[in-house]
Each structure stands twice: as C-alpha cells, then as structure tokens.
Amino acid sequence: MNAHAVIAMSGGVDSSVAAALLVEQGYQVTGVMLRLWAEPAAGCRDNLCCTPEAVERARDVAARLGIPFYEVDMREPFRRAVVETFVAEYVAARTPNPCIPCNREVRFGLLMQWALEHGADFLATGHYARVRRVGDRYQLLRGRDRTKDQSYVLHILTQEQLARVLFPLGDLTKREVRDMARARGLPVADQPESQDVCFLADGDYRRFVAEHAPEAVRPGPILDTAGRVLGEHKGLIHYTIGQRKGIGIAAPYPLYVLALDPQRNALIVGRAEELGQTECVVARMHYIAGEEPPGPFEATAQIRYRHKEAPVVATPLPGDRLRVRFAVPQRDITPGQYLVLYDGEVVLGGGVICAAWESMLSLL
Amino acid sequence: MKRAIYMDYSATTPVDPRVVEAMMPYWSDIFGNTSSAHAWGQAAATALERSRERVARILGCRPSEIVFTASGTEADNLALRGVAWAARQAGRGHHIVTTPIEHHAVEATVEQLHRLFGFEVTVVRVDGHGLVDPEEVRRAIRPDTVLVSVMTASNEVGTVQPIPEIAAVCREYGVPLHTDAVQAAGRMALNVEDLGVDLLALSAHKFYGPKGVGLLYIRRGLALVPAITGGGHEGGRRPGTVNVAGIVGMATALELAEAMREEEMARLTRLQDRLIEGILSAIPDVRLTGHPVRRLPHLASFAIRGVEGASVVIGLDLEGIAASSGAACAEGEARPSPVLEAMGLAPEWAVGALRLSLGRYNTEEDVEAVLEVLPRVVARLREGEDQSL
C-alpha cells in the first residue's frame, strides 16, 4: 500500500504542480481545498484564495491527475482563529500577520488533523520550503528558490508536524515549477500574488477593523518623545511605524511615526534620526527543535515576510521570551509582526515582536 | 480493484437504458418545435401530448392538469409563486403555511415571497420523527391563508407525511395544498385523488429518468400566474420551447418505475432494514433519524454523535462508497442541518448526519460492504477528534 498524502490545493500553479509531483512519486493522493471565512461583500465574492473559479481550477487539476478532490468547510474555525485575532491585534495597536495563526491553527492544525482522520500519512502543500531529517529530529529549511522562500510563515511547525508534512516544491525554483506545469498541461496562470489579506472585501483593513471594533478609532494625543502634545490623531488604526504622510501636523522638519502606545492611546512621533532600534523583545517563542537554546546565540533574523535578514545576537529570557540585539539598527521593528531566526538556511524558530513598552517591562 | 458502490439514489439515479432508447428519436429525427404548425411540429406535439397522457394516467389526473418544467425546483417555484401571485392579484389574502423540513426549492421560494412580496408565513412544528400533525396545520390556517405546502416525504430523513389527512384539513377551509413529491416518486403510489393535493411537483432524474425535466400537477380550476413569462407553451403556464426528448424520457421512466415499484420497494425495504439494524448495532452513539416506520423504503438516515457528516461522506468516498450527509444541495457545509434541528436534535448529533439511499443496482453485498467500512471510518474520525497534534 502506497503512502497516502493529502494535498492542500488552491487552484494555482504551485499546489497543482505539487499534487502532480506526488502522484508521479507514487503517493496515493487526495486533493482538498479549504473553504475559509470571507467578509460578506456586494456580489458574491468569496475568500480570495477560494473563489468559485479557483475551486473549479483545482477540481479540474485533480480530475486530470485522477485524484479525488474535496472542499472542506473551515469557515468558522478560520473566523475564530484568524479573523478575530486580526481585529484584536489591531485594537491592541499591533500589526498582525494573519497567515501565521492560519498556518498554525487551520492549515497545519485542523487540516492536518482532518488528513490523519482520513487515513493520510502526510499533509502536503505547495510552499517553497524544505524539511530535512537529522537523526530522529526534523529541520525546516528555506526553499531553494530564495525569491519565493516561504519558510517565514512556516516557522510555527512542530516536530510532530514536520514529521508529517511534504513540501514537494522545496527544491525547485518558480521557473522550474512553471515549466513543469506547462509540460504537464496544468494551468500555469498564477493567482495574483496579492499582499492583501485574503478575507477582506476590498483590502482595506482599517475600515474592517473600525467596523468590527469601533474603539480602535478613538482620537487621541500625538506626542513627541519628550511627551509634549503636538496635536490629535484620528485613531491608532490609521498609523504604522515609519509612516511620514498623513500625520497632519506642521513641523519645521519631517515627522515620522515612531510608536503606537495603546495604554495612553497616543501616537509617538519624531525625526527620521529617531527611527530605528537595535533591540527588541520577542514573546511566545517557538523553537523548531522543540527546546530553548541554553544561552545567548548568534543568528540572522527576519522581522517581516519580505525582509532582508539581519545578523543578531539573541538571549533567551524567562517565559518563552527572547531579547534580540541587531548588529545594525532596523528602521521599522513592528510590534505584532513575527521575528523569525535562521542559522544559514535552517529555521531556528520565531515569535511575536513586543511593543517597546512591553519590552521595557520584561527587562525589569 | 477499487470498490465502487453508489448508495446515493436520493441525490440522483442513473437513466434506465430503456428510457435512453425511448428518447433517442427525439434528438435529431423528431426534432420539431411543438408550437409549429407544420408536420415536424405536429410530430413533436404528438409525442408531447402522448407523454402528458401517460404521466396523467399514473398520477390519476387529467392530462390538462400537467405542466412540464425543467426541474422539480422549477415546479415548486411555479406552484408557490403562481398561487401566491394569483391570490395577490385577486386580493384574496397573503398568508402561507409551510413546514421547517422542506427542500430548499420550497423554503427559499417561500422566504422570497415573504421578503419581496410581503406574504406572511407560518411554519408548523414537526415532532422528533419529522412528522407534521394535521391538527397543527388546522391551527395555522387563517382566513387569509392562500396556500399550504408540505412535502410528501423528506429528502433528508425519509419521513412520509400524512398528506391525505392534511389535505382533508385544507379542503375544509378551502385552502389549496401543494406537495413536493420529488423524493416520493417511483417509491410510493402517487395518485393525486388519493393524496387529495391540489399541486404536486416531480423530477424525472429521481426515478431513472433524465435530468432537466420536472412536472407540476395543477388541479383544474386553480388560479395560477406563470412564474416565468414568455410564449404560449404549456397553456401559457410555463413558457419556453418544450423539451420533448426529456419529457418522453420522464413519461417512460415513470411508467417503468411504477411497473416495478411494488417488487422493487419490497426488495429495497429488506436492504434498508439490514442497513439500519447493522449500523445501529455496529456503531456506538448513532441513531436513526426520521420515522422508524412511516419512511421511504430506500432511505436510511442517521445522526452519528461527535463526527461531522461531511467528513464521514469523504471517508466513505475514499473507500469507494457514495453517500451523502443530507440534501445533496447543501453538501460540504459544516453546520447542523436545519431539518434535524427542527426535529429537536442537539447540535452534536445534528452535525453528524449521514444518508444512505438505496436503488436499483444495490445488492446485499453492497450493504454488507457498507457495514464493514462505515464503523471503521467513524472510529477513525472519532479517534482523530480526541487526539490532535
């Protein structure tokens, strides 16, 4: 009996080729497409990654590969784990990355469980990342195609999950994947690679958060770093760290958003020179190896999905936290975003960046 | 060799080869438009009227009381909207009585009549078996009631309603009764006089006929406004060029199903009994849904505690067995069926709906195979619920 792999399909080129490769490698393959919650909007637009057209494309690919295909309804768990968290994070003046809870709770949580319940040995996805077995442990590595590497959003995987995931595209480049799709007569059209959040009707997260949590749009003071009141802001949801335009006060020099302070509902602004930090604290650290390093260690860190990694020295703190010191100041270390640590190609783990004031408390 | 067992005959059935054969001349040879005056049109019209007579004979009505449609859903739409609009036109009231276990074709149409046209709606209760009490219908009827709609037999749980008794109540108050008999056709005797109904909807693909053909019986004298507008086909009550091949297929299929009905239903009842008894004894925490006795002879429906029906269906499909978690039209939704909730089933039971519907090509071996596979699938799903990564 061949090993059974469930492949998460999106109708795009990556997951279609991943499914084809699994079939060619001799796996028993089952295709699934997640139905995720999306904001009800005019017309009947569904979630960006599961529009009716995408479902039809995925179904068509599955039929050509001769594998069964199912839609699995996870709208409600997705709403709870991803959408509600998204709103709560913005209310707390943080900038969330909804792909991380989605991967942790939905894709590699509930869908993995679904796959195992249906007799699968593996859950496969079209992510560009690699898994390597070293002794009885598993490592997560960057995808070979550095321009497509998605290891950042996979840093939440556990040893148990790594033992049961397959990333058939990890050793391929996007160009190779496209060529393979063409050679196999699979749809090569990419889903538009949108930076938008998949469940928003119009890509406007400010409007969405304001509708779901009106308290996020309370006006409050604009302060400088010395605590002087310079004006009034329209609600913290409207600002991000590093922003220059739209602050709405006249000053003899350009003003930048330095920080959002939810405690005082204050917007902290200052000069360009005041932007940039050399240090931050990361909470809820997850280590791929399953254990915290015993002491300070050197690594490189990525503070956003598309961030060029920077060298750091990291020091574990009590309570699953980590102090991270950058060799070079980073301009927009944003609370709520994930900091992911690498040793060369190998993902060490990651956690959530704390706000400066939270960092201060944790250092006391 | 992979197993392939189709046990979802309530979703649809394969077309009987004899039906296919009967339809053959009407694609390319006798292709005329029934409305045309010439010989081609007359030949098509003759086939149409012969089919109408054949269907009417089985339903015990006049041929002129049959209107062919493109589906059972369309027949339900025509009945509800047609009668409601006619009543509105005549200023005869604006109240409709229905049940919480209707097919979407009825439920959504009534909902739209309420939302867009201001009709008031009373939804009568059903008991734990999904049965409607005729006395509840009596209590729901008001002086301004223009229509009662109660399905003949449930597509989800197979419960057969006391339609003659409900019809007697409606007749006392002079209110027309519509019934969606789509699931009952070919499985029960459907004589409109015995049932006492004024409107009855059927769909050919549920009894080994082709998809894309349905019909509505409309008692003579009942005022009805067409739900779609166009030319004069079907006496103006259902405009659109007539699907002659499909209608010939429907008439043939209905005759064949009727001729085979008693023997075939006795056979399916035995299979159904074995299926029910086997599943209830092999799987813990499972119950039969619908009425234990007053049920369609081919439909075994269950609530399995602690698992999602959609997941069971996929688990069975991976083993080569086709089943359903309720109505095929609501497939893939991970929420409890409103029909089961109306029957008072708690959500942890109602999400685990499974429907196995038997038909002409099922054998005892099929039933035994299901009894072997299903307990395994359910056990694996329950195990997974308990220990996730």
Image (cartoon, coloured by chain):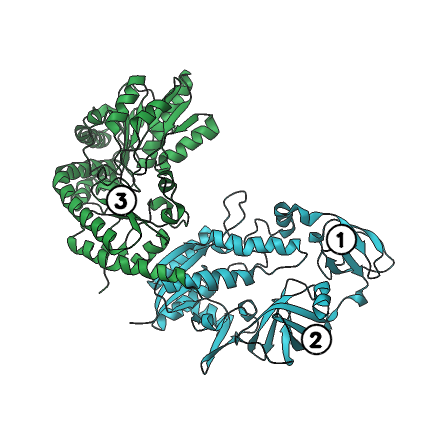
Chain colours: A cyan, B green
Residue A218 appears left or right of A51: right
**Secondary structure under the numbered disc 1 in the rendered image:** loop
The residue that mark 2 highlights is A326
Between residue A363 and residue B143, name the one nearer to us: A363
Q: CA distance from mark 2 to mark 1?
A: 30 Å
Q: Looking at this view, is B320 or A350 the one in front?
A: A350
* Residue B258 x, y percent position in the rendering: 15, 36
What is the quadrant of the N terminus of chain A in the image?
A: bottom left
Instruction: Check the residue under mark 3 and report the chain it is in.
Output: B
Q: Is residue B364 above or below residue B171?
A: below
The residue identified by callout 3 is B10
Point out residue A29 in the picture as x, y percentages from the top left corner.
Answer: 35, 66
Where on the picture, by quarter, is residue B61? top left
Quadrant position of residue B318: bottom left
Residue A171 visible (yes or no): no
Tag count: 3
Which residue is identified by label 1?
A246
- Mark 2 — on which chain does it sit? A
Query: Is residue B134 rendered to the left or right of residue A247?
Result: left
Mark 1: amino acid: Gly
In front of the other: label 3 or label 2? 2
Residue B130 horizontal/vertical position (percent): 31, 37
